[in-house]
Image (cartoon, rainbow, N blue to C red):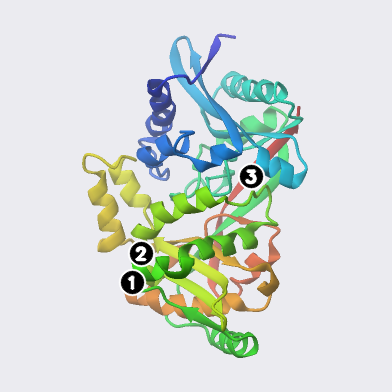
């Protein structure tokens, strides 16, 4: 076998690691490139707060001196402690259609994990749930989103050939925006509001977001909502601060819905934004020199007909009580006003019945499925 694995050690190596995906998919109409500047931060221990509880190395595969693959090896100690596991994650994996390449990359992650006491390998997963996760196994001719992974159809075939099995699946839905709030939602929203003393709070400006730690409390609510989900590790204060600083300034606050009780406690939140898929494709994953223009246009005035549902979280003690109806009753008129025709749900665990049930009053199509694979070491 003439596959050489090289560990990323320099800044130039890291640039090569990131750009390999862009080069591999540059002519693919369905792949959406990650923003290069975001990736540099993600892989930097100095910039990414997840390194407080994660360790990682990155590897490049060469065949006959030519770059043919990449993979990240990650241990999330916080998640392992939470779930009682000793798991090494593989993420950001890409490879040409040669089983020896994928085998060499994954064998490298396995050995890296064994050396650190791990007993299983899982992936594709990122440092945390806030990173893209899951290998696409259905929906290869659907446009990807900025929050998900796109990969060629041969990837999962390699995983099966190498003896990996299913850990969990996520599904994604295309949700058509109704012309008006469904009557059922209006009734449920009214009942929930009166029964539990809940109301929607609209954020008006950055000052409103930061006042009384509202932004932080939104992410703490998301922490509580996501805690039972596969592989989740709670966001730390530094992570929350990073997300607030990075994402709050670019959100159109009309597309954010916060549900509070009469004491001002945040019970649920829905965060959405215009799709950035086409803009990222036009920008070729780079902010500079001109990528910022495509991204700004998509955010402000040149919106696609599609929006991304980034996060919808309901505090566990209010789940299954119809609180989501309050969020949709607030956001559907906004979506219509802004001209959106449909939404991308992004990833949802297939066995999360509470999430799946929220779409029962909408016209939806399940159009993508992705999988986390696992194997004992």
Q: Quadrant of residue 122?
A: top right
From the viewer's perspective, is 88 left or right of 239?
A: right
Q: Position of residue 253 (x, y in %)?
A: 38, 69
Name above or below for residue 32 compared with residue 347: above
Q: Name the residue under label 2.
A: 305
Ranked by sequence position, the earlier of labels 3 and 1 is: 1
Name above or below for residue 209 compared with residue 195: above
Look at the image and tell me whether residue 341 can be seen. no
For label 2, count other residues whose C-alpha is less than 10 Å away and answer few (under 14), some (14-19) or many (20+): some
Q: Quadrant of residue 264?
A: bottom right
Q: Where is residue 312 in the image (x, y as percent from the top left)?
A: 55, 65
Q: Relative to the observer, which residue lies in front, 333 or 118?
A: 118
Image quarter hosting the C terminus: top right
For label 1, count other residues whose C-alpha is less than 10 Å away and answer few (under 14), some (14-19) or many (20+): some
From the viewer's perspective, is 60 left or right of 26?
A: right
The residue sitting at 44% across, 64% down in the picture is: 272
Of the numbered discs in the image, which one, if any, rests on residue 339? 1
Ranked by sequence position, the earlier of labels 3 and 2 is: 2
- CA separation in Å, label 3 and label 1: 33 Å
Q: Relative to the observer, which residue lies in front, 330 or 175?
A: 330
Q: Relative to the observer, which residue lies in front, 243 or 211?
A: 211
Name above or below for residue 231 compared with residue 314: above
Name above or below for residue 103 compared with residue 90: above
Ranked by sequence position, the earlier of labels 2 and 1 is: 2
From the viewer's perspective, is 159 left or right of 257?
A: right
Image quarter hosting the N terminus: top right
Q: Are marks 2 and 1 in contact (CB under 8 Å)?
A: yes
The residue sitting at 67% across, 47% down in the picture is: 231
Q: Where is residue 234 in the image (x, y as percent from the top left)?
A: 62, 52
The residue sitting at 78% across, 43% down in the picture is: 84
Where disc 1 sits, the SS reads loop
Q: Name the residue under label 3.
A: 371
């Amino acid at each position: 076998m003439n596959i050489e694995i090289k560990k990323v050690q320099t800044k130039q190596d890291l640039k090569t690691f990131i750009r390999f995906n862009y080069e591999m998919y540059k002519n693919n109409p369905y792949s959406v490139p990650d923003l290069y500047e975001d990736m540099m931060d993600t892989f930097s221990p100095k910039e990414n707060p997840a390194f407080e509880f994660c360790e990682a190395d990155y590897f490049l595969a060469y065949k006959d001196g030519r770059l043919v693959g990449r993979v990240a090896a990650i241990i999330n100690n916080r998640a392992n402690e939470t779930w009682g596991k000793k798991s090494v994650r593989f993420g950001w994996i890409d490879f040409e259609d040669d089983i020896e390449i994928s085998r060499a990359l994954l064998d490298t992650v396995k050995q890296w994990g064994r050396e650190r006491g791990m007993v299983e390998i899982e992936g594709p997963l990122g440092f945390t749930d806030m990173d893209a996760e899951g290998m696409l196994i259905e929906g290869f001719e659907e446009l990807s989103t900025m929050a998900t992974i796109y990969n060629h159809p041969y990837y999962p075939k390699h995983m099966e050939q190498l003896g990996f099995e299913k850990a969990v699946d996520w599904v994604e839905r295309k949700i058509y925006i109704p012309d008006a709030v469904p009557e059922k939602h209006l009734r449920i929203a009214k009942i929930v509001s009166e029964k539990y003393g809940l109301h929607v709070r609209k954020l008006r400006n950055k000052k409103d977001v930061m006042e009384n730690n509202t932004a932080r409390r939104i992410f703490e609510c998301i922490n509580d909502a996501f805690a039972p989900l596969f592989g989740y590790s709670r966001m730390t204060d530094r992570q929350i601060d990073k997300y607030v600083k990075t994402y709050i300034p670019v959100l159109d606050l009309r597309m954010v819905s916060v549900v509070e009780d009469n004491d001002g406690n945040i019970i649920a939140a829905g965060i959405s934004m215009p799709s950035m898929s086409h803009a990222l494709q036009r920008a070729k994953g780079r902010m500079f020199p001109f990528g910022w223009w495509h991204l700004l246009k998509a955010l402000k005035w040149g919106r696609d007909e599609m929006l991304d549902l980034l996060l919808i979280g309901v505090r566990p003690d209010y789940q299954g009580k119809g609180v989501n109806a309050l969020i949709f009753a607030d956001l559907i008129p906004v979506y219509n006003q802004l001209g959106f025709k449909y939404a991308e749900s992004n990833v949802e665990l297939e066995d999360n019945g509470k999430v799946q049930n929220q779409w029962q009053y909408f016209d939806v199509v399940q159009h993508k499925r992705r999988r986390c694979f696992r194997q004992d070491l």
